[in-house]
Amino acid sequence: MNEISLHEYCEQIEIIIEQGRYAEAVAHGQHILKQYPKHVATYRLLGKAKIEAEQDEYATDMFHRVLSVDPEDLVAWVGISELHDRRGDIAAATWHLERAFEVATDNEMGILEDELRHLYGRRDGLAPERVQLTRAALARLYLKGDLLSRAISEFRALLAEHPERVDLSVALAEALWRNEQRLEAVEVCQQVLDKHPYTLKANLILGEIWTRSGREKAQAYLRRAEAVDPENR
């Protein structure tokens, strides 16, 4: 590990998984975690290796750990959807794939849309011609388009209905921070971190805000961020 970067090492593990060498991939992942015990990318890789090896309980645990750090992680949402599908829980598989669709890039949406249509067909008996965007997906489009006030309003309304959804809280915090509503962003980030202390984006936002304010507490949040993302990617 001293000869290559952590990111390069993870890329090599990704190749090992693609080659079907799952036990070897897990061994490399566990080796990384001895030095970087909270490295979120390694937990994502372990989840991918274990789901391919059909070790579903382990894979589920890994993907939930990823989402506690990055509730906007596409791979984890897709992985948990697949695990529910294997168990025959189409409703849960659909719900988790909808969350993946909400955080997907434009290039990823096409593939996910096809899979969502398939799940809707299995659930409802008829696949729709098109997948309708959820309110959260629309709110994220507002965020991407710098329509920050509209994004904030929509995320707040969604959270009033679904207060348990950390992905929406993190998105709201980002929208508030980008809209220079820093005190409100702090409040939302602290609510997230009370339950999930290593959520990356919340720690980064608080670290930036308190650094700009000259407060020593900034370093505590930035150290947490570095623990899950040692290369500051």
Image (cartoon, helix red, strand yellow):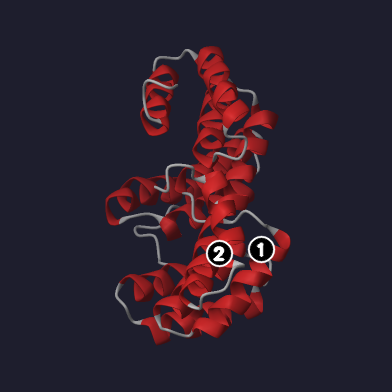
Classify the position of the N terminus by image quarter.
Answer: top left
**Front residue (pair 183, 93):** 183
Res. 202 mark:
2
**Front residue (pair 171, 183):** 183
Identify which residue is drawn at 42% across, 84% down.
Answer: 180
Whether residue 122 is visible to the viewer of this picture, yes or no, is: no
Few, some or many C-alpha atoms within 10 Å of disc 1 (few <14, some 14-19, many ≥20)? some
Identify which residue is drawn at 50% across, 62% down.
Answer: 204
213, above or below 34, in the image: below
- Three-letter amino acid code at the position of disc 1: Leu
Asked if the residue under mark 1 is in contact with the one under mark 2, i.e. CB atoms within 8 Å, the reply is: yes
Identify which residue is drawn at 55% across, 64% down.
Answer: 202
Few, some or many C-alpha atoms within 10 Å of disc 2 (few <14, some 14-19, many ≥20)? many
- What's the CA distance linking mark 2 and mark 1? 7 Å
**Front residue (pair 25, 119):** 25
Whether residue 68 is visible to the viewer of this picture, yes or no, is: yes
Q: Quadrant of residue 147?
A: bottom left
Helix, strand or loop at label 2? It is helix
- Three-letter amino acid code at the position of disc 2: Ala
Q: Find disc 1 in the rendering and name its residue.
A: 193
**Where residue 38 sits in the image (x, y, percent)?**
60, 40
Helix, strand or loop at label 1? It is helix
